[in-house]
Image (cartoon, rainbow, N blue to C red):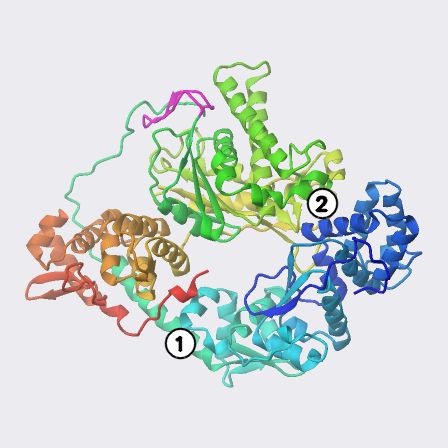
Amino acid sequence: MYDTDDTTAHEPTEKRSLRFATDLEADVSLTDWTALRVHRVIFDETESQFALLEALQTAADGVDILEFEHRLSSCGFDVDGSVVKLARRRVAGERRALWDLIRYARRLGHDEMGQPQSALEDALAFTRLLGYSNPQQTIAIGLNAAFRETRRDQADEIIEYVLTLSESVDVVLGGSEIDRVYLHNYYGDILPSSVTNPCNDTRNDYSITTLVDVVGTDGLAVEILRTVGETESGHMAYSALQSAFSQYDRTTVSRRLNEKLIEYGLCEKYGARGNLRIEILDKGALYLEELAKEKERQKALQDYVTNTPKPNHNTRVITDRPRGGREDDHRPTAEGEASTTPDGRVRLPRYHGVDYLSYAETVSAAKTPPKKGVSVTNYPVEPKSDRGEAGWGYLEDENTLVVSAEYDSAMSHVVMIARALLDPKTFDQVLTEDRLAELDGLIEDGTYVRGSRNLGWLADSVDSAGEYVDVLEDARDELLDMTRSLAHEDYECETSEYLSRITKTAMGLAGTAFHVLDLLDIDVVWEARLPDYNRHPERYGEDNAELLATTLAKNAPIAATYGNHVVRRLLFEDRDEKRRQSFDPVVDASNPYANLIASISVVGDFGNRADHVAGVIEDRLSNPGEIHEDAPEIALKVPVVVEHGPSTVARVTRAMCRAKGLDATRDAIRLFSGFARTPYDVAHAIGRGLSQEATPREIRSSEVRLSLASLPSKRLLEDATPTVRAMISTLLATNLSLSKTELAEKAGISTQSVRNHLPTLVAMGLVDETEGQCRLNLSFTDEQERHKRILPSFMLTESFTRASSLRR
């Protein structure tokens, strides 16, 4: 592969592969393409940097300085250039030279680098140098419309860079079939057939159901589609479209257009640069029609829910009282301390356990929050008898770990989360020896993961990931000993200082665990439970939402990254010496936003205060702390959602159905979305209501009925009156048609209430009344109907496709 006669054991690796894929998560995807930008994004990643270090060490191993320089020259480096000079310093034993070399690779093309030859030549040489390592990564480069619009001379350099890179590592070019055709037309003579094999445009293969999940039913992409579709001709100038959405950044509009609308065949862009036009395609027009129909259906259901007659006010009012104890002040307690809450629950006088979450609990926590965001769900989670017990769950097929704890105070909550993250179950089932071995090189050196990911407890003496796990387990046990000492008042400093020390230690351990898991591509969901929020909202003299929001705001920057750099160190670290220990990120001006590396699910019985809780959390996360004066121009962006749409219900339904050996259907998803109040309700309904199937098949509407019947009536029909919920719950639970009197008796309501509400239910198509007998329009579970598709009449106005093809 290189122009060298060297035949020692340290030759570059054999040529790797280059292929094309239409479905991948890209490591590199730009809106302003050049070869050097592609290079900088790749070498800003930990794996590429470590591969570069390994390659340099391998190339220098066992040869004299002249041979070493010859190898570097064969890669394409100038013998008198900066790279060779840094390499000489490394061979002479100067360890820092390695990190200067990484900085050089990451900053190629910047004016201050002062390269004697062109930056592109050095970039190509670095990719060839990687051939001396044996990198296990696959680099995914996502093409898009912006790439197709790049000047040809710049595109030529990008393709040259990709081809050279593919000689040392496996490379996948990703994009639509349009991108593949573009590569075939312009670079078919130099790219392999694995990339350029032309295919027909398959964008019309996407079903409306798929588009609902991918494009959504509202938001900027849909507004762009509507704007184009409402023009008389069905097309408009690209400049006019940008003007119509001038309140958004131009890059944001372009990204939504390319990645949501053009990518999925709803719109097309045509014309020369400077005279571009956007046209809505037939699929886009059909999609807008589908959204309009769905809006009418939702409006009809909402009208039913909100316009039902008011119940009589002649019933008893029962007020909630604490189950035991007094509502006086009690401070959050520590590991090993016994105390009683206002509702009689205790922290047992021992080390608290980490118990398995049920599958339904794991799925609902994992699937409800947005990716790298926060969800707030109004669901009455069951209080634990020991409120200091953490929860642990793992979805192995989706590589997602869930850790859960009740929220009493910042200290107790973060201690429980750290304990759950570093529980033996994590090392037995998630961070296995084979997985941890992937980090051996990074851990053995330690410099980079300390400087970028800020991994704690990583001493120079730690030589492998296995040894690091032992250190972290010891640190976990020391943390728990600290909480026991707190309980027994066995400490010498002020209590406030000791509490702060415990909290900071727990935050550091949790943050380290989050980053270790993220380095191994393991998704983590952090669930904060507030079971008593609506019953004791001010247990500590301050709104629990404020306390929780403050805790999340302090921990979020620790569990967030920009590139591979920890946000807390970049933005909020006030210690100069700590900032000097960290590497500086390369900030992409088109994407200056950092993201969480975990998702967060906040769940509790919030009553009518869920919006308040979400608002407080969003406000605190938008301003986590005071930014130091030398901070880079980046910001932490965390979406917070409180309303859970059909797409969230779909994720939960599919996951729960798979566990039961069933395929989710769109019928089932729509039914669960309409009848159950939250995604948590859906998960528990399927978990409790259905048995495991030996042979995979689609879920039946009768089984949806069986699942919904397992829910308490108050968990049905968001915003409906208690009377209506009681009627629907009663009809779900029976395979018989009932008279009004029977329905009233079984539902525990008056006959007059049934007469008041029944006409609305019938008009909505939810209930059928024939000869004085009432039934819910959903398949019974008996032998006669359990295989039939009987649905509320408003769902029968169109045919529905299977939803199993939309799995993520």
Question: Does residue 446 appear in the picture of this structure?
Answer: no
Q: Residue at x 72, y 35 (%)?
A: 578
In 3D space, how far apart are the residues under numbered discs 2 and 1 (Cα atoms)? 48 Å
Q: Residues within 10 Å of mark 2 (few under 14, many from 20)?
A: some
- x then y, percent, for residue 576: 75, 35
Question: Which is more toward the observer, 438 or 664?
Answer: 438
Question: Which is more toward the observer, 313 or 505?
Answer: 505
In the rendered structure, are the residues bearing label 2 and label 1 in contact, judged by CB atoms less than 8 Å apart? no
Q: Of helix, strand and loop, which one carries label 1?
A: helix
Q: Is residue 651 left or right of residue 701?
A: right
In the rendered image, which residue does mark 1 sit on? 289
User: Which mark is drawn over residue 735?
Assistant: none
Q: How many marks?
A: 2
Q: Residue at x 61, y 30 (%)?
A: 471
- x then y, percent, for residue 46: 68, 49
Q: Residues within 10 Å of mark 1 (few under 14, many from 20)?
A: few
- State the quadrant of the N terminus: bottom right
Up/down of 543 relative to 364, above or below: above
- The stretch drawn in magenta includes residue 11: no
- The stretch drawn in magenta includes residue 337: yes
Q: Residue at x 86, y 64 (%)?
A: 118
In the rendered structure, which disc, 2 or 1, sits on the residue that comes first in sequence?
Answer: 1
User: Which mark is drawn over residue 631?
Assistant: 2
Question: Which range is magenta?
Answer: 333-351
Q: Main secondary structure of the magenta part?
A: loop
Q: Amino acid at mark 2?
A: Ala
Q: Residue at x 14, y 43 (%)?
A: 314
Up/down of 323 relative to 451, above or below: above
Q: Amino acid at mark 1?
A: Glu
